[in-house]
Image (tube, rainbow, N blue to C red):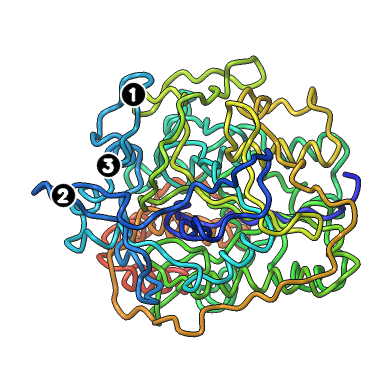
Amino acid sequence: MQKIKHIVYLMLENRSFDNVLGWLYDEQNSPKNNIPSQTTPYFEGLKENTYYNIDKEGKKCYVTKGTSNKLDVPSYDPNEVYEHVNNQVFGSKTNPSPGQKPTMSGFYEDYATFYNNAPQIMQTYTPDELPVLNGLAKNFAVSDMYFSSVPTQTNCNRAFAACGNSLGVTNDNQTLQAWVNNRNVSLFGLGKPAGNQFNQPTMWNVLYDNGFNTTDDWMLYNSSGANWENKLKLEGYSYTRALMEQLQDQKYDSHFGKMDDFLTNAQNGTLPTFSFLEPEWGLMWGGIGINGNDYHPPTNLQPGEAFVKSIYDALTSNQAAWEQTLFIINFDEHGGTYDHVAPPWNAAAPWANQETPTPQAYEQDFKFDRFGVRVPLILVSPLVEASTVFRASGDTPYDHTSVIATILKMMGVSQDKWNLGSRVANAPTFENVLTLGTPRTDIPTINVNANAQVADIDAPPNDIQQTMAQSVLTTALQQKAQKQSAKYTNGQATDKATKDMRQSLQNAKTISELSSVLEKHLKTILQ
């Protein structure tokens, strides 16, 4: 990896590029460096009185600059499943015709079907409101042409970020299907634990199988935190591991650690070559229950900003290690928030070669030939020139598989050993953004927004919160079975009590109720 000895990768949740970084630069304040280089500096951001959607009465609803320091905008979670993303991007829930040009015109009306304060979906944050994310993007490098891998929600995009595909078996364990939407176990006969759905190899399996099999090589750190571990009495929960079946072998146990360990190792300069970080997942926001620090709407973004700052501060606290570090920040999907850039159609199907099996079924008849909505990708390193905006040099844009390909390439795994399918094999990589031969000596000061307002309302739980609650319940049941030397039946709810617990989570009307019900069940199970 030449001068990089530590790669740190943080994937956050559900924000489009325009929503959090759209005002990073303007015509009077252009980026100083573009990759590929260009005579006229470029940055595909927002402009006032330019981008709009039309409401049902034919009125233009323009993008709004700023949220008045309210960091819970949008205050209800926007729609994010595949059909609704179609509606946001093309103006219709039905599948578009091949090559149909996205209009990016349906965000307003799609949000209006769910929440009566529809103008919120056109509100976007300024650099002053989110100074940590924007400060890192401006002081280091950001791509303004990076797209989520699938035009849908969290789980499938996180699967692409790990495996380069979203393949998994159907609930009867008979059919290999290409998934686009999250699955809720309470709706599928409880045949599998929530989230346990993707069965293909991950980049960590590739590393392990190619000699990078120690904890000095790679670790996944979860941010269970005081809420998840102390309040919910659940220790060491990793959502990534719950999602990826091929990470669940006991031989990988030592590769999972806690965020506190990561911060300590960063300060001591003892991080592994590759660290993947999970945020603390939100079941709540504001002062109610579990806020989380994952940036997922409608949670208050202040904890997320503080979380990213804590990572940056830990990494920069050890000068010697910092000089050899690359910190990658991206978001899994746009989460229904507005973006004005049309996603391209030229996505490679993961199974175009024989490395990844061809699915027997396609959910929603989606053929994985187009990318999802644009999201942030930020590269933070003393080997990155300040105020850099970068794009892929060819026709294929960056997506989550670009991160996989870049990491495997930088760690020295021969490409013929990747075997993660066509999307990863053809993904453009971004190691060329590390242009400086000598590390920078400046360490930009990054601070959170001191004027942020606190959210004070409750809302219905979103899909990922429901999935997380079901998955946490499954993990608790597994732990109980292990303690009692009993056999856990792969998620089967064989008794009425378990079925009732799952149903009570499904019936929760607000996020605070979901958190309270889950806490009650976990105390019962793990007491």
- Image coordinates of residue 481 in percent, x first then y, are 57, 57
Image quadrant assignment for residue 151: top left
State which tag comes first along the sequence, 1 or 3. Answer: 1
Picture residue at 54% right of the left edge, 50% below the top: 488
Alpha-carbon distance for marks 1 and 2?
22 Å
- Image coordinates of residue 72 in percent, x first then y, are 37, 70
Picture residue at 31% right of the left edge, 20% below the top: 97
Which quarter shows the N terminus? top right
What residue sits right under mark 1 in the picture? 100
Q: Secondary structure at mark 2?
A: loop
Amino acid at pointer 1: Gln
What residue sits right under mark 2 in the picture? 55
Amino acid at pointer 3: Ser
For the residue carrying disc 3, how many other residues have a C-alpha within 10 Å: few (<14), some (14-19), or many (20+)?
Answer: many
Alpha-carbon distance for marks 3 and 2?
10 Å
Of 523 and 84, nearer the camera is: 84
State which tag comes first along the sequence, 3 or 2. Answer: 2
**Residue at the farthest bottom position:** 450
Kindly indicate whether the residue at mark 3 contacts the one at mark 1 (C-beta within 8 angstroms): no
Alpha-carbon distance for marks 1 and 3?
14 Å
Of 490 and 85, nearer the camera is: 85
Q: Looking at the picture, does residue 59 appear above or below residue 320?
A: above
Q: Secondary structure at mark 3?
A: loop
- Image coordinates of residue 385 in percent, x first then y, are 75, 55
Kindly indicate whether the residue at mark 2 contacts the one at mark 1 (C-beta within 8 angstroms): no
Q: Looking at the picture, does residue 219 appear above or below residue 317?
A: above
Q: Looking at the picture, does residue 217 appear above or below residue 136?
A: above
